[in-house]
Amino acid sequence: MIVAGSKPFQEIEEMLSGFRKVCVMGCGSCVTICHTGGEKQVTELAAQLRLSAKLKGKQREVKEASILRQCEWEFIKDTGEDVQDCDAILSIACGIGVQYLAERYPKIRVFPGVNTTFMGGPTKQGVFWERCAGCGDCLIGTTGGLCPVSRCAKSLLNGPCGGSQNGKCEVSQETPCIWHKIYDQLDTQQLLATMEDIVPPKDWSAGAENHPRKMVLDHLVMKK
């Protein structure tokens, strides 16, 4: 899932300064799980914006809306009634949702209400860790299903650096050394010998540095 954190309210206020009719638009997928962009957060943020405007003596109408996915056209196309007459949309979806709304409504200013951060998952209630860097060349089939690209501070591909101690990363003692975990995983699977295979330099051109990336599933593309 895509992990996103809420922007500071002051930053949101500055973005929306001067806009009199705003729609706060939530998303029912990743950001709902993150507790930063679901229906509950739409209600809370809209109430905060109304109260702030009232305290400052400003005229501001704040509408509330949420759809299942802001990252798919099928869900966005019917949002017209929600944003009708609005001069700004505050999207609290990931950056994909914000951009899709901006393309759907080119005459309306669309602002991000969250900071899209990484692809990860919850490890316990309220704690999310990065698990995938979207590097475009997945190699975790040889590392026990654990990703050294996203989970090693140095993205090392051939074992740990010399700085890890007691299974912890030298960058932060809070962070497990992923290569320590990979070793344990491969040991459990009796595949330790695979660590002797040298992984060649990674082709980073398939990663986020080579954007915008594109994937085409030919069997799903509608032919004319």
Image (spheres, rainbow, N blue to C red):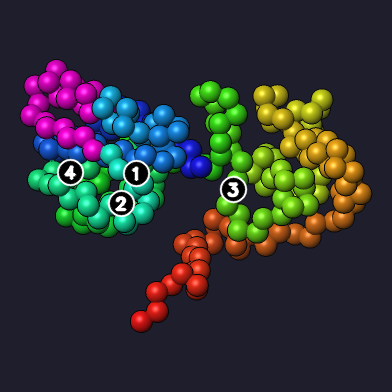
Of the image marks 1 and 4, the number of the one nearer the N terminus: 1
Gap in angstroms between the C-alphas marked 3 and 4? 34 Å
Residue 68 is tagged as 1
Gap in angstroms between the C-alphas marked 1 and 2? 7 Å
SS under mark 1: loop
Q: Where's residue 45, x and y in %?
A: 27, 27
Q: Can you identify the residue that label 3 sits on? A: 133
Gap in angstroms between the C-alphas marked 1 and 4? 14 Å
Say if 17 sits above or below 76 in the image.
above
Of the image marks 3 and 1, the number of the one nearer the N terminus: 1
Of the image marks 1 and 2, the number of the one nearer the N terminus: 1
Q: Can you identify the residue that label 4 sits on? A: 82
Magenta segment: 45-65
Residue 199 is tagged as none
Q: Pointer 1: residues within 10 angstroms few (<14), some, or many (20+)?
A: some
- The question of residue 9 being in magenta is answered with no
CB within 8 Å, label 2 to label 4: no
CB within 8 Å, label 3 to label 1: no
Gap in angstroms between the C-alphas marked 2 and 4? 13 Å
Of the image marks 3 and 4, the number of the one nearer the N terminus: 4
Q: Can you identify the residue that label 2 sits on? A: 75
Can residue 206 be seen here? The reply is yes
Q: Nearer the viewer, residue 160 or 163?
A: 160
CB within 8 Å, label 2 to label 3: no
- Nearer the observer: mark 3 or 1; the answer is 1
- The question of residue 56 being in magenta is answered with yes
Q: Pointer 4: residues within 10 angstroms few (<14), some, or many (20+)?
A: some
- Nearer the observer: mark 3 or 4; the answer is 4
CB within 8 Å, label 1 to label 2: yes
Q: Is residue 214 left or right of residue 175?
A: left
> What residue type is disc 4 on?
Asp
- Nearer the observer: mark 2 or 3; the answer is 2
